[in-house]
Image (cartoon, rainbow, N blue to C red):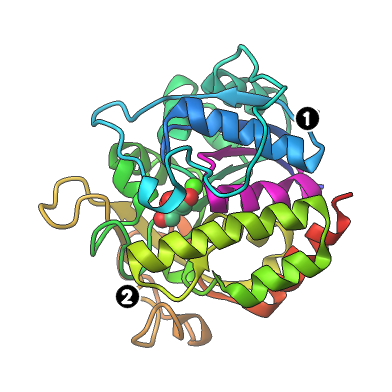
Amino acid sequence: MKKVILDCDPGHDDAFAMMLAVQHLDVLGITTIGGNCTLENVTKNALKVLEVLGRTDIPVFAGHSCPTTVPLVTAPQFHGETGLDGPVLPEPVTKAQDKHAVDFIVETVMNTEDVTLIATGPLTNIAAAINREPGIVDRVKELSIMGGSVTYGNWTPAAEFNIYVDPEAAYRVFNSGIHVKMSGINLTRQCCLTAEHVAKFREIGTKAANFAADLTEFFIDTTVKSASLSGANMHDACAVAWLVDPSLIKAADMHIDVELKGELTRGMTVCDYRHLRGTDPAVDLCREPQMDYRGEQPNAEAALELDFPGFMELLYRTLEHYN
Ligand code: BDR
Ligand code: CA
């Protein structure tokens, strides 16, 4: 099993990322970051999710409450006031560890071989860990993120939420030398759950599956109201699914940087795909032969195409296997 640390801000789709990770990967710890909601709430939510999954053996470490240079932006219109509205859950019995998330990340990576990082919230903790101990760059196996986009944004026309919240941190990470696997909005919009999927979760009927159904019902409702989409995108689960079953995602190597100054484009991931033939990077670039790179050498792999039926199979199987 791949050894991972999951840095997240649960968040409905973060909860799905946790469900996949906890069952299919060796999760050394969950670290939390202010993003969808306050640090206090997302940490509490992470503990609640682990309690539903019966995995309170996995330690949780709270990280930064906000970006270093700008105030925190949260997303109550999608995740509710608690960050995980919808399912009715008791207050968690378990507590977060005393150690700071950044200390946990640095110590674990420096002392354990082949750790993969997963980040499904703003990249504040990951950038702080790199700044604290640049030696982690050569020791981390790779970093799988949900964030950014090869094409359009969601928070602004150009920027996706996780990158928009802390662009300086994202810039640090993409320019650090760590190999980044980017599941951006262009990919995660292909992962759209509707009432039909909720019905299947109810049919599976395990505690975890009913929890998934409650989460999805709430998330569909807010996504339809706030973003006029037809269902709920399980963005964060894609970054984990890619590690669990790489055949689910087609991707292309490219150089990715982060726009920090643009009046309209702050937080945009600028993806150089000039070496790829085709016109629609969300759909058909990965099927075409590559030409020589025209700009800088790739620092990332951008996800382009999701096998959505395969993803759902993995998710159903996962929910069946929890108790
Ligand atoms: C990202 O923003 C958050 O609201 C989700 O949890 C996901 O990580 C999608 O843009
Ligand atoms: Ca998230």
User: Ligand 1 within 8 A of label 2's CB?
Assistant: no
Query: Dot 1: what SS?
Result: loop
Q: Which residue is mark 1?
A: 56
Query: Which type of secondary structure does the marked residue at label 2 adopt?
Result: loop
Q: Position of residue 138 (x, y in %)?
A: 56, 36
Residue 96 visible in the displayed image: yes
Residue 193 in picture, x, y percent from top left = 57, 71
Q: Position of residue 216 (x, y in %)?
A: 59, 60
Inspect the image, locate mark 2, and give the three-letter code of the amino acid beneath it. Arg
Residue 71 position by quadrant: top left
Instruction: Confirm whether residue 314 shows in the render.
Output: no
Magenta segment: does it hold 19? yes
Looking at the rendering, the stretch of residues picked out in magenta corresponds to: 5-27
Crowd rating for badge 1 (residues with CA inside 10 Å; few <14, some 14–19, many 20+): some
Seen as rendered, the residue at the extreme left is 263
- Residues under numbered marks 2 and 1 in contact, where contact means CB atoms less than 8 Å apart: no
Residue wearing tag 2: 274
Q: Who's the residue at 62% across and 47% down the image? A: 87
